[in-house]
Image: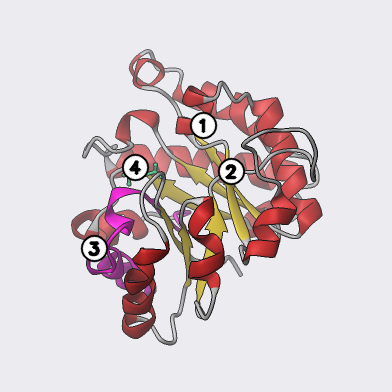
Amino acid sequence: MRRKIAAGNWKMNGTAAARSEITALQAAHPDPRVDILICPPATAIAALSENAHPIHIGGQDCHVATHGAHTGDISAQMLVAAGADHVIVGHSERRTDHQETDALIAQKAQAAYAAGLKAIICIGESLAERENGSTLSVIDVQLAGALPDTATAQNTVVAYEPVWAIGTGKTPTLDQIAEVHAHIRARLRARFSDGENMSLLYGGSVKGSNAADIFAIPDVDGALVGGASLKADDFSPIISALENA
Ligand code: PGA
């Protein structure tokens, strides 16, 4: 059975003062039929993970090492100690802002596994790649490079996030999402013995008004949501759409 996941990526927004959003999600979804995950900035993980049940709390990135001389970085073990059970790796903003490569992202995923975290590994094409018809080959390179051989349905979630759809209000057509998800699923099945059961999320301008249509697409097991995850009032309808998908 694949896990269905509604994941919120708060990016560089929110502090411990955003507790009220977690509380509101708990009240709206006391017994959720899907996994609900919020990834706040690292500084808020410890505070927000306290009494967060049934909401899972995750990090947005981790370093490949467990500890050491890496100023400003945070290890997967530190995320666990703060109360996280997931970590996003390879988000397109990390790839762009911090020049992260597929090889580095695979190492980060392995660091996450070693700490006992589930890694949400992000992939997705740029607008130029979409327009020149190389989407599926870009996806293949990212899947091959960013997913470790040790990835399993237990430790890994794949998030397909077209870079041009992130934070832009633009989304691919439902057919385009279906095409890429079917392609990724075929690759996961071919490479991993339990690839059939790996959860595969769509991300990029998901909101309450388009969530149900996106969740009806085969091989879409949930969403990684940015802007519409910041407020429980916006995120809750997305969670409900996934529960009812
Ligand atoms: P968005 O971000 O929902 O604001 O487009 C998605 C993401 O970056 O994960």
- How packed is label 4: few (under 14 Cα within 10 Å), some, or many (20 or more)? many
The residue wearing badge 1 is: 94
User: Which mark, by number, is residue 61?
Assistant: 2
Q: Start and end of the magenta stretch?
A: 219-245
Q: CA distance from mark 1 to mark 3?
A: 25 Å
User: Where in the figure is residue 105, as x and y percent of width and height?
Assistant: 66, 34
The correct choice, above or below, for 74 with respect to 71 in the image is below
Residue nearest the viewer, comparing 10 with 19: 19
Q: Residue at x 34, y 84 (%)?
A: 27
User: Which mark, by number, is residue 204?
Assistant: 4
The correct choice, above or below, for 173 with respect to 36 in the image is above
The residue wearing badge 3 is: 234
* SS at circle 1: helix
Mark found first going from the N terminus, 4 or 3: 4
Mark found first going from the N terminus, 1 or 4: 1
* SS at circle 4: loop
- Tag 2: amino acid: Asp
The correct choice, above or below, for 112 with respect to 239 in the image is above
